[in-house]
C-alpha cells in the first residue's frame, strides 16, 4: 500500500508550544495530534513541526516574519496543513478584535500562498476575564469562525476547552495557570484538532475521488 506523506506545521505562541508549569514543562498538542493522525489515517505518514513562540503577537510582533520563514525556509518541505492559533496575546495588549483579525488574515494568506491549507484555531479564554474582555474574545472568535476562503478551515478550540463553563474539578485537571493548559489539557486540545483534521482530510479525499470519476 502506498503511503502519502503529509507535512503539518503547528504555528502560534505559548499554547502551541505547550507551555505549562510557568515554562518548566512543555507539552505541545502536536504530540497527541501526531498519535491520533497515525491511528486514524494509516495510509498517510504525517510529519509534524511545531513553531510556538511564547508571548508573540500578531500586531507589532513577529508572526509575519516567522510564518514567512517557516513556509519558505526549506524548499524540500512543503506543508500540506498549517495549523494557526493567534490573537490571545494581542487581546492582552488591548488590541481590538478587528485590528487583530486584519493582521490574522495576513498571516493566513502567507500560509495559503505557499500552497498549504490553513486550519485556524479560535482563541481560548482565560481566568479572571472581565465582561468587556470576554466580549472582545467572543467577537474575535466569531470573526475567525466566520471567515471563508479557499483552502481555509477552522476549529473551535475555545468551545472544546472552555474555562468558565467547565466544572471546577475538571478545570483543575485541564487548566494549569488560568491561561495555559496541563499535559491532560494539551492532550485534549490535540484530540479536538485531530477530530477536525481527520474529518476534513477524509472529506477532501472523497471530493477528490469524485472528481477523478467524472
Image: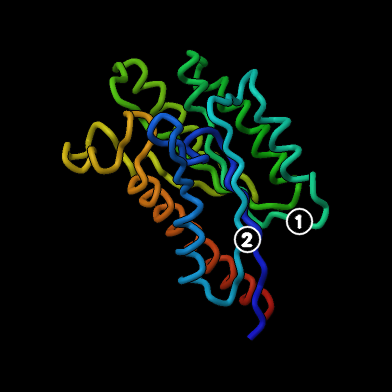
Q: Which of 81 and 179 is in front in this view?
A: 179
- The C terminus, quarter of image: bottom right
Judging from the image, what secondary structure is the residue with disc 2 in? Answer: strand
Q: In which quarter of the image is residue 191?
A: bottom left
Locate residue 39, reporting x and y percent. Answer: 46, 71
For the point 38% across and 51% down, the residue is 187
Locate residue 38, reporting x and y percent. Answer: 51, 69
Marker disc for residue 159: none
Does 37 sit above or below residue 161? Answer: below
Residue at the extreme front of the image, as rendered? 24
Q: Mark 1 points at which residue?
A: 77
Residue at the extreme right of the image, as rendered? 75
Q: In which quarter of the image is residue 164?
A: top left
Q: How far apart are marks 1 and 2 (CA)?
A: 10 Å
Q: Name the residue under label 2.
A: 47
Tell which circle, 1 or 2, labels the residue nearer the N-terminal end: 2
Amino acid at each position: 500500500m502506498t503511503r502519502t506523506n503529509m507535512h503539518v506545521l503547528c504555528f502560534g505562541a505559548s499554547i502551541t508550544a505547550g507551555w505549562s508549569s510557568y515554562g518548566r514543562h512543555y507539552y505541545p498538542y502536536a504530540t497527541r495530534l501526531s498519535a491520533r493522525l497515525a491511528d486514524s489515517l494509516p495510509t498517510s505518514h504525517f510529519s509534524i513541526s511545531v513553531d510556538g513562540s511564547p508571548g508573540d503577537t500578531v500586531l507589532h510582533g513577529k508572526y509575519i516574519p516567522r510564518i514567512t520563514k517557516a513556509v519558505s525556509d526549506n524548499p524540500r518541505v512543503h506543508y500540506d496543513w498549517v495549523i494557526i492559533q493567534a490573537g490571545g496575546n494581542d487581546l492582552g495588549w488591548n488590541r481590538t478584535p478587528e485590528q487583530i483579525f486584519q493582521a490574522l488574515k495576513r498571516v493566513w494568506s502567507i500560509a495559503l500562498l505557499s500552497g498549504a491549507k490553513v486550519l485556524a484555531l479560535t482563541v481560548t479564554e482565560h481566568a479572571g476575564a472581565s465582561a468587556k474582555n470576554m466580549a472582545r474574545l467572543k467577537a474575535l472568535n466569531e470573526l475567525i469562525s466566520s471567515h471563508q476562503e479557499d483552502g481555509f478551515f477552522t476549529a473551535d478550540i475555545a468551545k472544546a476547552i472552555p474555562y468558565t463553563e467547565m466544572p471546577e474539578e475538571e478545570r483543575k485537571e485541564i487548566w494549569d495557570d488560568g491561561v495555559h493548559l496541563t499535559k491532560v489539557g494539551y492532550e485534549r486540545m490535540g484530540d479536538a484538532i485531530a477530530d477536525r483534521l481527520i474529518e476534513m482530510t477524509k472529506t477532501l479525499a472523497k471530493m477528490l475521488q469524485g472528481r477523478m470519476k467524472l
